[in-house]
Image (cartoon, grey):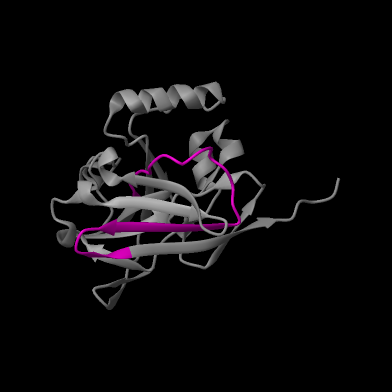
Amino acid sequence: MRLSIDGVERVFAPEVLVVIGYAGRDRAAVEHHIDELAALGVPRPASIPLFMVFPPWLISQEPSISVAGSESSGEAEIVLVVDGDDVVVTLGSDHTDRALEAVDIVASKGVCPKPLASTGWPAAAVGDRWEDLRLSSRIDGGVAYQDGSAGANLPPLDLAASIPWAGPRPSCFVAFTGTVPVIGDIRPSAGFHAELAGPGLSPLELSYRVETVPPLAG
């Protein structure tokens, strides 16, 4: 996994990928969202926030991903790459199978690649301005899909520090730290473009295509 940080390319070898869900700062709003999902058949999460662990090979920096089925979609997220004591901020998409989500939330995350940007910021460059960061995404030819303040979620560094490791913390791991609401309905798209921006920081961008594996006959 490679990231360009301040113009210098760095190589990381994460041991674990952690996806953090239900990371909203407003607990009442999180509970309301859980109730909305329950009405669609999505089971209540085992914990809030929900920490889900996956193998790092789900991370993709390719221009396209392949998925099975036609009901998956992306989610723009702030992503932390923790390498020893060093923390890098980048941008990713928690691409999720929405049909499977109604059956098993964790499984719905684990069957889709997790696209990741190719650039990042040192966490020190963000400092204490996490609430000034803004996440947005567009789908299918530029249609606005997400646009929200990172301040709506719990602070990414706090989330990463609270991951309940069963043993020693991995020396290098990647953490997806939560998304912002969509504009309209959650829906699939053939293309996904996300951006993470903040005052005094060069915007981070991520674009990828979604290719659906053709179904079998019968």
Query: Where on the picture, by quarter, is residue 8?
Result: bottom left
* Residue in the image at 56% along x and 64% along y: 64
* Residue in the image at 41% along x and 51% along y: 76
| 31 sits left or right of 131 in the view | right
Residue at the bottom extreme, as displayed: 8
Is residue 185 positioned above or below 137 on the image? above
Q: Is residue 129 magenta?
A: no
- The one nearer the camera, 97 or 188, is 188
In the image, which residues are magenta? Answer: 175-203
| 88 sits left or right of 204 in the view | left
- Note whether residue 43 is visible: no
Q: Quadrant of the N terminus?
A: bottom left
- Note whether residue 139 is visible: yes
Instruction: Indicate the position of residue 122 as horizontal and vertical percent values.
Output: 21, 64
- The one nearer the camera, 40 or 171, is 40
Is residue 205 positioned above or below 22 on the image? below
Instruction: Indicate the position of residue 130 as horizontal and vertical percent values.
Output: 21, 49
* Residue in the image at 33% along x and 57% along y: 196
Instruction: Indicate the position of residue 203 as horizontal and vertical percent values.
Output: 31, 64
Q: Quadrant of the C terminus?
A: top right
Q: Is residue 177 magenta?
A: yes
Query: Where on the picture, by quarter, is residue 151?
Result: top left
- The one nearer the camera, 22 or 36, is 36
Is residue 99 positioned above or below 95 on the image? above
Residue at the right extreme, as displayed: 218
